[in-house]
Each structure stands twice: as C-alpha cells, then as structure tokens.
Amino acid sequence: MSDTETSAQDFATTVEQLESLVERLETGALSLEDSLTAFEQGVRLARQAQTRLDDAELKVRALSEDGAGGLEVTPFAAPDDAKKASKEGVRDSDSSSSESSSSGTSSQETPPW
C-alpha cells in the first residue's frame, strides 16, 4: 500500500472515529466525566484531521507549480462546480478581454454581481 493510500485511509479512519464520538456525545447518555473524555479525544482527532488536510494542501500546492517555478494556484471545486466554472471561465475570458480593453478595467477589479 502506498503512502497516499495509507494517508487517505488514516484520514478516513480519523473522521469515522470523530463522527462516532459526536454521535455518542449527542445521545446525552454519557456521564459528565465520560463526556469530557470523549470531547478531549474529539479535539485531538479534529486536530489530527486538520493537520492531514493541511499537509495535503501543501502537497497539492507543490504539485501545482508552473514551469517557471511560480505557483499556479487553482481553487478546489466539487466536480459539478469545476465543470460549471470551466465553462464560465471560457465565456468570462472572452467577454473580459473586450471589456477591459474598452473600459480600461480588468474583470478582477469589478465584483461579479
């Protein structure tokens, strides 16, 4: 098993454990001491999950460097959002080039609404 598969499995396991703790806490059946212990464990798991997400983001950024060594940052999007954004991006780039040349402003300076 590769490091990526292990990391993904570890992240999934961490999230499952966190969800299980939340369910136990939401039932209200735990004593105060048990609730506190579960909460502390949940905080630790949430921090572990966040660390893994941060590490993954760093790897994505490293892999997204352009040929000149600059960073080509692309936003993360759900598959449906990515398709929609790519279609809109083509339309926006066509219209923004004519807008920016005629008005002297770029599309980044004007709000999308």
Image (cartoon, rainbow, N blue to C red):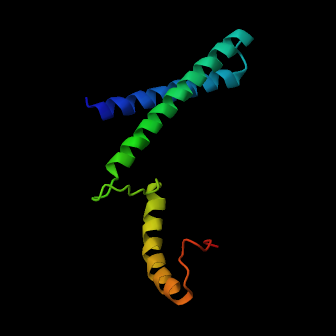
Point 38% across, 30% down: residue: 9
The quarter of the rendered structure image containing the C terminus is: bottom right
Point 59% across, 23% down: residue: 42
Vertical comparison of 108 with 34: above or below: below
Vertical comparison of 51 with 27: above or below: below
Point 62% across, 71% down: residue: 111
Q: Residue 77: x and y, percent? A: 47, 55
Q: Give the number of marks.
A: 0
Vertical comparison of 111 with 71: above or below: below
The quarter of the rendered structure image containing the N terminus is: top left
Q: Residue 69: x and y, percent? A: 31, 55
The quadrant in which residue 104 appears is bottom right
Point 48% across, 76% down: residue: 92
Q: Residue 59: x and y, percent? A: 36, 42
Q: Nearer the viewer, residue 93 or 72?
A: 72
The quadrant in which residue 11 appears is top left
The quadrant in which residue 67 appears is bottom left
Q: Viewed as shown, does residue 106 lie left or right of 9?
A: right
Q: Viewed as shown, does residue 103 lie left or right of 72?
A: right
Q: Viewed as shown, does residue 83 lie left or right of 3?
A: right
